[in-house]
Image: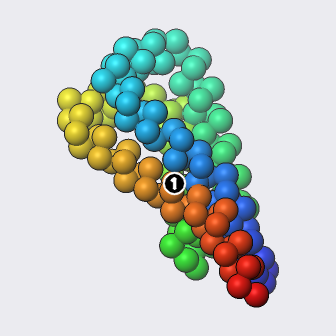
Amino acid sequence: MQISDTKGRTRAFARVIGPYITIVMPIIIVRLPAMQDTLSSFFGIGIIPWMTGGFLLMAGLIIIALHQYWSSAAAIMISLFGWFLAFRGAVLMAAPQLIQQGAERALPSMLAVQMGFGLMMVMGLYLTYVGWMAGSAKARRL
């Protein structure tokens, strides 16, 4: 694959993943105080974690298969995001209690969790910029 193809593919993934992360992270940050009830409901019905894990695994595998690039900060973020989704999905399917225990242990450290999601939001903003604005700014200069 040529360099322009890799940049185009990275931009395409950034156009989807960036806004998704940018929208979802602030919602999680705001809803975090009520997350204990949400976690109980989510893990209370055994099929929901299994199905969610399946969707996460599939999404991660799609990113891994179609974006095998590590040539820029955005490319690295996208590739790592794919591996994170695949790993998290597999664990959610095979051992959902590990995800549940991790989430329950993290909730008392509310500020640290909010800061972590805030950093993810910054990553989403950066990917949104790379996907939607960086390329068009270069095109206008040509």
Q: Quadrant of residue 112?
A: top left
Q: Position of residue 67 (x, y in %)?
A: 68, 65
Q: Is residue 119 left or right of residue 24?
A: left
Q: Pick the quarter of the image with the C terminus.
A: bottom right
Task: Residue at 58% x, 63% y: name it.
Answer: 129
In the image, residue 55 sits, relative to residue 7, either above or below, namely above
Q: Position of residue 62 (x, y in %)?
A: 71, 52
**Around disc 1, counting alpha carbons within 10 Å, would you say few (fewer than 14), some (14 to 19), or many (20 or more)?**
many
In the image, residue 132 sits, relative to residue 46, either above or below, namely below
Q: Is residue 88 visible?
A: yes
Q: Position of residue 109 (x, y in %)?
A: 20, 35
Q: Pick the quarter of the image with the N terminus.
A: bottom right
Task: Residue at 53% x, 47% y: name it.
Answer: 21
In the image, residue 8 sits, relative to residue 82, either above or below, namely below
Judging from the image, the colouring scheme is: rainbow
Q: Is residue 78 visible?
A: no
Q: Quadrant of residue 135?
A: bottom right
Which SS class for mark 1?
Answer: helix
Q: How many marks?
A: 1
Query: Looking at numbered disc 1 in the image, what kind of residue is underneath it?
Result: Gly
Q: Which residue lies most toward the front here? A: 140
In the image, residue 35 sits, relative to residue 110, either above or below, namely above
Q: Position of residue 91 (x, y in %)?
A: 49, 38
Residue to which mark 1 is pinned: 124
Task: Residue at 68% x, 80% y: name it.
Answer: 138
